[in-house]
Image (cartoon, helix red, strand yellow):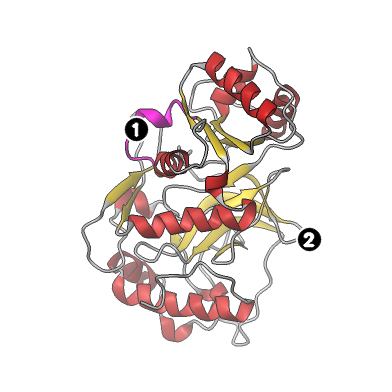
Amino acid sequence: MVFDDPFHPFTDPEFEKQALALFKYQFENNDVYHSFCTGVKITPDKVKSIHQIPFLPISFFKTHEVKTTPFIPEIVFRSSGTTGSETSRHFIKSLSLYQKAYYSSFQFFYGDPYSYTFLALLPNYLERDDSSLIYMMTDLVQNSASEDSGFYLYNHEDLYQKLIKLKENGQKTILFGVTFALLDFVEHFSIDFPDLIVFETGGMKGRRKEMVKEEVHTILTQKLGVPKIHSEYGMCELLSQAYSSGDNLFNTPPWMKLLLRDEKEPIPSLIDSSFKYTEPTTGAIQVIDFANLYSCAFIATEDLGRRHPNGAIEIIGRLDSARLRGCNLMVI
């Protein structure tokens, strides 16, 4: 299928052409998305720009089986959530497609992932077997060229000793941790490891008092001796990820885009016959992810973003009407 291998650079015209073709394909082969599009009276014959494509509200992943073409999933990823809360489900037709997505996304920004030592401090995620994050981290740990890669629960002393060893050996190292666990760790241990790449993800999960992200990053940079805290913008409803190398500014790989829309106008307007569109500086984040071939590639999130002059998106919060969702990796 022409959409099966989207992990390569696109020019803007090529990206739009691919997006419009994928929109038509998913409109014709995804019952949930088809019903949504017809409900808002937007069909492929009316759409000439990516800004006119209807973006499926992410909440549909909680209430419907969002599938493009019928298939039996190889796995179903579920979002995390507070006890008793409704969670999203992402039906995965092809795990190999997901593997290509996260490998290619990571490689685009950081190089070959398997050349790193991965230390995963994700205690709450390890308690689940349906997390897309754990699936990705397990693959990265198991296929890492370093025997020092591994998962950590609450054995902070072991993690500290491992970090000292890796620093002394000059190994390329990534520490990937959920926010509350990283803060728990640095309450008792500190290290000066400037070359360490620290990914903070997942928020407090009800384990600690919520904090402003800048405050969290200040504590972590001081205690771990790193210049910046990196982040991943991903969720169980997406197969690709956007990455931030600091300052909460996210960029996407070439097969993924973050677009902003006026949060008061969730449905694209078809009135302007010139198809011109001016993106707001601040607005609700919409995602195009070509890797979401067998679910929906066009998703309206419940997050707010701000576009910076360099094109990066700053995650600034949540839509007022949105309920907190555990799989959002950028809690502020």
User: Tag on residue 274?
Assistant: none
Q: Would you say residue 313 sits in the magenta stretch? A: no
Q: Would you say residue 122 sits in the magenta stretch? A: yes
Local packing at callout 2 (Cα closer than 10 Å; few below 14, some 14-19, many 20+) is few
Looking at the image, residue 8 lies above or below residue 148: below
Measured Cα–Cα span from mark 1 to mark 2: 40 Å
Horizontally, residue 236 falls left or right of residue 182, namely left
- Highlighted magenta segment, given as a residue range: 121-131
Local packing at callout 1 (Cα closer than 10 Å; few below 14, some 14-19, many 20+) is few
Residue at image point 53% right, 84% down:
48
- In the rendered image, which quarter contains the C terminus? top right
User: Tag on residue 309?
Assistant: 2
Q: Quadrant of residue 180?
A: top right
Q: Residue flagged by tag 1: what amino acid is it?
A: Arg
Mark 1 or 2: in front is 1
Horizontally, residue 189 falls left or right of residue 44, namely right
Q: Secondary structure at mark 2?
A: loop
User: Where does residue 27 sit, x and y in percent of width and height?
Assistant: 36, 74
Dominant SS in magenta? loop
User: Tag on residue 128?
Assistant: 1
Residue at image point 70% right, 25% down:
224
User: Where does residue 99 sit, x and y in percent of width and height?
Assistant: 42, 54
Looking at the image, residue 189 lies above or below residue 84: above
* Residue 199 visible within the image: no
Residue at image point 75% right, 27% down:
225
Q: Secondary structure at mark 1?
A: loop
User: Where does residue 327 sit, x and y in percent of width and height?
Assistant: 45, 41
